[in-house]
Amino acid sequence: MATPTLAQFIALNDQLVALLKAGVPIHLGVVPGNRGAAGAVETIGATVARRIGEGSSIAEALDDRSVPSAYRCLAQLALRSGDLTTALTGANRMAGALDESWHTVRLSLVYPLVICCLAFGGFILFCSLLVPTLDGMYLSMRIPEGSGLHAVKTLKSTLPYWIAIPPIGLVLLVSWTRFSSPQASASGLAGRILAWLPGMSKTVFEHRCMNFSETLASLLDAEVPLPESLRLAAAAWEDATLEQGTRALAASVERGEVPDDGSPFATQLPPFLRWAIWHADPAVGRTRALRMAADTYRESARRRIERLRVLAPIVTCVVIGGGVTLLYGLALFVPLAQMIRGLAS
């Protein structure tokens, strides 16, 4: 197999830049700057090309810390297989899956935000109209001012200072989600945020299993030896622990050792993927088994997204919208309850 050349890498990087400028979703893990994802890819390409010009190999240059794992994985796969279309398939699917998950999460915030906006408007009217009435009733009936009335009077007196904060925050949130969405696929921003959300971390992990399986299968199809394929595909995890474990597995396979199903790395992998790498049936073949695993995790992630599409709006509406409505109700009824208690005593 011919060693990739600098000219091939430059051509690959130029194609990636052109695709990003055309709006094609590609998961590269870059951090967009003022020039967007395409500008970030151009900068990475220049850095890698300079290191190659200084005498480093392409693999060594791509291992630089400034090169994101997703970009390194795609570049290595494209250069070793000689087929950019094959390399782009996994990155495009990964970008589409993360974008769909990110869209589901953003959509789940619509209903709670509507409730919050209505409650905020009602609270402004409450502070402007009802609080003075309550204060007058307390004074006319000579009832000692309770903590509830004191709190809402404080909010009314500071109304000019905080009234603009929630609307400005809402505008900033909407603007950030709108402007960050086009860059989310290339930057990996969606994946990093989703990995911290309850119920979404498993979906992101299945996306990564899918990407790793497809990358490893494509490298094996390109007749890259298994140990080297594992080392090259390790970057597809975008996780330092799993990447290190994959590289350790590649080293043990290269030494002719039998992989241990009880190793810490093996226990982190789903059973089907572990079987596809370790013990694929000769009649099926490792490459076919890996593609079967990729299809399985893609379908599993899709089903999870469909469930989240229904459950996420309900959960966020109950937690956020219900919490705001509860606070609004307490602000209204606590002063009234304390006034009634004062009359009774």
Image (cartoon, grey):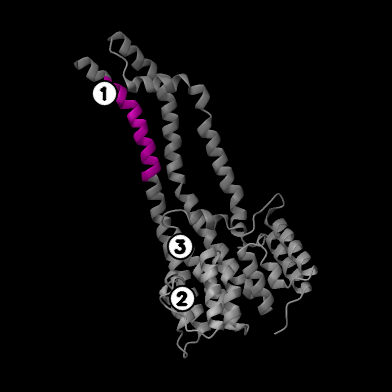
Q: Is any atom of residue 75 visible in this view? A: yes
Q: Residues within 10 Å of mark 1 (few under 14, many from 20)?
A: some
Q: Amino acid at mark 2?
A: Leu
Who is closer to the viewer here, 231 or 327?
A: 231
Which residue has dot 3 on it? Answer: 203
Residue type for callout 3: Thr
| 10 is higher (above) or lower (below) than 323 | below
Residue visible at 52% across and 63% down? Answer: 97
Asked if the magenta segment contains residue 319, the reply would be yes
**Label 2, on which residue?**
273
C-alpha gap between disc 2 and disc 1: 61 Å
Tag 1: amino acid: Ala
Q: Secondary structure at mark 2?
A: helix
Residue 130 visible in the current orientation: no
Give, as a single range, the part of the protein colored magenta.
318-338
What percent of the width, then of the height, locates residue 178? 58, 48
**Which quadrant of the structure image shows residue 307?**
bottom left
Give the camera-side residue of 6 and 109. 6
Residue 59 image position (x, y, % from top left): 68, 72
- For the image, the number of numbered tags is 3
- Residue 81, percent from left and from top: 66, 79
Q: Which residue is mark 1?
A: 337
Lower position in the chain sequence, tag 1 or tag 3: 3
Helix, strand or loop status at disc 3: helix
Quarter of the image for residue 38 reads: bottom right
Task: Give the mark, 2 or 1, whose residue is nearer the N terminus.
Answer: 2
